Image (cartoon, coloured by chain):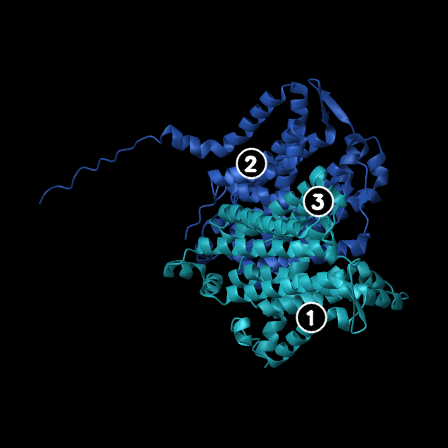
Amino acid sequence: MLVNLISGDTPRSAVLTVLLLIVLVCLAGAPFLFPGVRSLETAATICIFILLVASYDLLLGYTGIVSFAHTMFFGLGAYGVALASIHIGRGWGALIVGSLSGAVAAAALALIIGLFSLRVRAIFFAMITLAVASAVAVLVSQLFNITGGEDGLTYLIPRELTPAFRMGELFGVRVNGRVLNYYLIFVACLALFLLLLRIVNSPFGRVLQAIRENDFRAEAIGYRVVWYRTAATCLSAAIAALAGALYAIWLRYVGPDTTLSFEIMLDILLMVVIGGMGTMYGAVLGAVIFVLAQNYLQNLMGVAAEATEALPILPLFLDPNRWLLWLGLLFILSVYFFPTGIVGRLRSGR
Amino acid sequence: MSAAPDHAPTMTRASFAHRLGQAAPYLLVPVLIVLGFLSIGSSSSWLTLTVSGLAMGMMIFVMASGLTLVFGLMDVINFGHGAFVSLGAFVGISVLLALTGWTTAPSLFLNLAAVLLAIAAAMVLTGLVGWGFERVIVRPVYGAHLKQILVTVGGLIVVEQLIHVIWGPDEIFLNRPETLKGAVTFAGAALEKYRILAVVLGLAIFVAMRLVLRRTKIGLIVRAGVQNGQMVESLGYRLRLVFIGVFVAGSALAGLGGVMWGLYQEVITAGMGERMMILVFIVVIIGGLGSVEGAFIGALLVGLLQNYIAFLAPKLALVSNIGLMAAILMWRPQGMMPVVKAK
């Protein structure tokens, strides 16, 4: 039954299984294992990014398409929830309407972009998504009447999901709406992640992998490559939008920096590649490592910069703001030497 | 045995529609300029907008030309091209700032000498970095588009961060050289001097590039390599060396574009190349990947349209480029002047 739940796609490595179980247990028990506002914040971010990165992996790792518009879809979901909460009013209905309309809008936009670019060459897609995503990001910051511009939007979510809603104590931890909110996100992310596993292990997913390996041959066998590529794009866009909706529910704020910026797009790329392309589990490891590094590596680099203060030049490279430099180098090296990422390494080294 | 039938080929002239289709990309720029005139109405503001549109188009073309040739020749798509734009701008502007004595003197000769020195320094350095970039980053991933995109994006991040390390995290403001400030008045329209210089410089580069590509042996090899690389190699030319040359030249041109854009905006940031890449990609796509002429026309269209729309309907200026791209891809899915590959 457990194997059925993960669609028969077992981790195929003892170390990987242990790591995944640790991640699952830590995330499932986060409010009780690591009490505190900041760690709960980190855990929720990890959940959402696992889902976001997994949906990107469907595109990059399984279908072999590079998209730079994934944050745009992520943002569409987030702004969907924000706008619905503002215009419909505080309530569960607004969250559902906002999430679903964000997902539908993302899928529709993905369909249009896909029809424009995927029918010619897959490489057009990378460039066109980059252009469209940047145009949307600029548009969102310009249309401040609707989107709040650079400041973004704040809105109210149902009271049951806010810290003001108290439910007593459990295992010595005060359970409030924030914890409930966390579990809503955890369960939704888990369910959607299992859905993604189901998709990539279905016959449809097999065709996607065939296209990734050799699109010409896939076409010759009789699969409509364009159709499959476009369908994968729409699916991944819709799930990214749902991840964005969850992020908006968690943060109770949306803004261009938190949902639409190109930096987040780069983060997603790094997570997929470091974790391992073409393995849904790579998304889990990549997101966990990256979010932890983002939250804690910068502190470490600050310490290192102070320690080397006396030396010339070196502190400049160790400045906490330069952490992207090191991740960029890691990214290049991992594309060269570990194209299958951590998961691929673990599986081959068993 | 009967005689062979007479050879009587029928030569019909290409129909008007067919010839119009072939000439259409060349006609688009004049048509757009005329349309701009009709919708703007006032000839002086039209002239100002046209010159600034052309200047912007020329600068985008300078950045895009290397990218499109590299793609045509070796099927390499370099997402790190924007890094050369930023790097060129920082190097060039540093030279200009070091030559403050020359740039503040009210002498056209000294000012131009400073600008040319800055351009030369920027081109040499970005050319060298481009050479290293090709060796270290691009060479191991030939033939794999997916890896190329990922690795060159990684290269873009690293170069951008290195710029932060060397020049600090803040943007740098600068003043144009003394005699390039201000505007000249022509037919009632104020034309910024620097924009005229940018148009002249861009046009000179385009003409020089066309001459090299059409009239020299190396140009012949490059064009032949774009059409059918294997055949050129089997004729005994080492296309790899040619490709490295084109890559270096393309990087140097991107650096030149960076200096020009920095002087145009009067502020430079490490992220400027990344932002320019978006326009560059639009230009390269609508021109047809691998086509220099296509990129030239595409760049002029983007520059002109953006300036006209910014005047007529400022809100729409942001989406005008995307709209242009969508329209052209609907008309010709491969871009305006797709490169014919013999395969």
Which residue is identified by label 2?
B297
Front-lying residue, A301 or B140: A301
Query: Could you tell me the amino acid type at mark 3?
Result: Ile
Residue occupying the point 33% across, 30% down: B13
Q: Colour of chain B?
A: blue
Q: Do labels 3 and 2 share a chain?
A: no
Q: Mark 3 lies on which chain?
A: A
* Crowd tier of the residue under label 3, counting other residues whose Cα lies within 10 Å: few below 14, some 14–19, many 20 or above: some
Q: Do the residues bearing badges 3 and 1 touch, measured as CB atoms within 8 Å? A: no
Q: Where is residue B81 in the image (x, y as percent from the top left)?
A: 64, 51
Query: Could you tell me the amino acid type at mark 1?
Result: Ala
Q: Mark 1 lies on which chain?
A: A
What mark, if any, has residue A86 been given in the picture?
A: 3
- Camera sees residue B110: yes
Which residue is identified by label 1?
A28
Query: Could you tell me the amino acid type at mark 2?
Result: Ile
Of labels 1 and 2, the one closer to you: 1
Q: Colour of chain A?
A: cyan
